Amino acid sequence: DSYAGSNDNKVLMMSGRLHGSGAFRRLTETAAFVTAVIAEDALRPGGRGHRAILEVRLLHAQVRACCRRAGYDVARYDEPINQEAMCGTLMLFSSGVILALERIGAHVTAEEKESYHRLWRLAGWLLGVDEALLPEDYGGERALYERVKAHQYWPDADTRRLFEAAVTGIADGAAGLPLGLQLLGGGLLRSEPFLREFTRFCVDPRLGKYLVERSEPRLRLVLEVLRGMTTVVSRAQRAPGMDALLHRVQARALHEVVASLLRGQRATFDDPGFRGRARAPEA
């Protein structure tokens, strides 16, 4: 979804960090950013998430400067990482994740949606998103996201280039996951056809059909089984005493995956890319 804005994706193309061999590292840093933000007390001053957000805010400023030096066409594509772009991307971290979870069978309560919305609303404020673009509740966020999509959601050839770079990068990087995680399902991430079908399954149907024109019935069946398993686990999590236990297991699994993908390196949010770039991207 974050590649679908044909104006905003020009910044990603110009930076180069999500277009080519560096895509896997950049996507892993995004996962590390999310795990930092959602940790308990993470957004208190000095917390892991608070520090990560401030680093990303500085990175955004650096990217804007790099874009201008590299000849970014502001008249054609609007200001790089502008308020609308930041707002739309922020909502992908919030309601975008919730919608994807629901598509694969997870049950998310209204209270959880509001709680997650408030978490990312604060993160957005810390990132510098104008308060007028930070809706008060989850319903307002969903309505605003549809308005942003109506204005910016026009995928183009660069959307496909970024998507294919992500698929290849994830498949290559997943080969480094520990055997135990691969046996538990992480091995599916090594399959490029599965990643394409999974994306088609989770994103806005209009974008899914644009990126993956033909669905594969065999892989679709795998995803239907996965959705059924997710539904069972989601319901079990509501049983008395199970919520805290499953939360710990899931949090530990997420930590292990991110740590494995980073291969012991600390996620840093200080690399804007732009290596060898001297002019604005072509449409």
Image: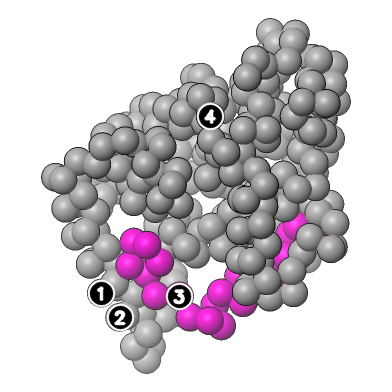
Q: How is the image coloured?
A: one colour
Q: Are marks 1 and 2 in contact (CB under 8 Å)?
A: yes
Residue with the mark numbered 2? 236
Report, in whole angstroms, how far the alpha carbon at label 1 lies from the one at label 4.
38 Å
Mark 4 / mark 3, whichever is N-terminal: 3
Residue placed at 68% from the left, 8% from the top? 276
**Pointer 1: residues within 10 angstroms few (<14), some, or many (20+)?**
some
Residue with the mark numbered 4? 156
Look at the image and tell me in which quarter the C terminus lies. Answer: top right
Q: Position of residue 18 (x, y in %)?
A: 56, 28
Q: What type is the residue that disc 3 sits on?
A: Val
Mark 4 or 3: in front is 4
Q: How many marks?
A: 4
Residue 254 is left or right of residue 86, and the answer is left
Mark 3 / mark 1, whichever is N-terminal: 3
Report, in whole angstroms, how far the alpha carbon at label 3 lies from the one at label 1.
13 Å
Boundaries of the magenta span: 102-125
Mark 2 / mark 4, whichever is N-terminal: 4
Residue with the mark numbered 3? 108
The secondary structure type at the circle numbered 4 is loop
For residue 228, what is the image quadrant?
bottom left
Q: Are marks 4 and 3 in contact (CB under 8 Å)?
A: no
**Pointer 4: residues within 10 angstroms few (<14), some, or many (20+)?**
some
The secondary structure type at the circle numbered 3 is loop
Residue placed at 42% from the left, 63% from the top? 101
**Pointer 3: residues within 10 angstroms few (<14), some, or many (20+)?**
few
Q: Position of residue 136 (x, y in %)?
A: 74, 74
The secondary structure type at the circle numbered 2 is helix
Residue 136 is left or right of residue 25, and the answer is right
As drawn, the label of residue 232 is: 1
